[in-house]
Image (cartoon, grey):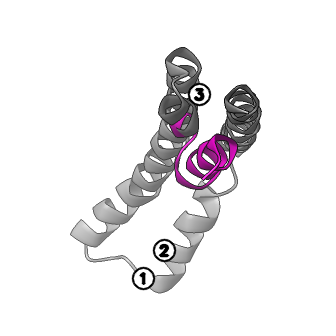
Amino acid sequence: MKESAKGALLSFLVYPGLGQLALGFKSSGVVFAVLATFGLLVIIYRLTMRIYQALDPMISLLANNSLSLSKTIEILNHSSYSSWRVEGLSLAFLVFCWIAAGLHAVLAGGRIDRKKG
């Protein structure tokens, strides 16, 4: 298998930076992996906070035995009204990192392929 194909498969299909690490470009591989991990962690953190914000009033209503389906829907609708800007930006950042890492792995692997001749 060509190095460019191996790097592309690892960076595009598995995780950003793995293609670079497999090809021997350790610093760029670590940078792509750290950036992608940061983007994922921000998304996971923000979604976890949204879940807790929705569950908190539900738990108190459940403790008082006054939780109903209509109240649950109202709480969930209210929790989804806030801005999704941070999550959207984090997702765009993650997609950008994924594409950039894949393209970089293809180009770096192509250089290795040309040197091997």
Name the kind of residue labelled 3 in the image. Answer: Phe
Q: Earlier in the sequence, mark 3 or mark 1?
A: 3
What residue appears at the point 66 percent right and 39 percent down from the top-left corner?
94
Q: What secondary structure is marked by label 3?
A: helix
Q: What whole-number distance in Å separates the C-alpha atoms at marks 1 and 2?
A: 6 Å
- Circle 1 sits on which residue? 68
Q: Earlier in the sequence, mark 3 or mark 2?
A: 3
Q: Are marks 1 and 2 in contact (CB under 8 Å)?
A: yes
Q: Is residue 10 magenta?
A: yes
Q: In which quarter of the image is the C terminus?
A: top right
Tell me: residue 61, above or below residue 68: above
**Would you say the magenta stretch is mainly helix, strand or loop?**
helix
Q: Which of 53 and 34 lies nearest the eye of the viewer?
A: 34
Q: Which residue lies furthest to the left in this view?
A: 63
What residue appears at the point 52 percent right and 52 percent down from the top-left corner?
14
Q: What whole-number distance in Å separates the C-alpha atoms at marks 3 and 2?
A: 41 Å
- Circle 2 sits on which residue? 72
Q: What secondary structure is marked by label 2?
A: helix
First to last magenta residue range: 1-18
Tell me: residue 31, above or below residue 6: above
Which numbered dot is residue 43? none
- Circle 3 sits on which residue? 32
What residue appears at the point 45 percent right and 55 percent down from the top-left corner?
51
Q: Residue furthest top?
A: 27
- Residue 54 drawn at (x, y percent): 46, 57
Q: Which of 36 and 89 lies nearest the eye of the viewer?
A: 36
Name the kind of residue labelled 1 in the image. Answer: Ser
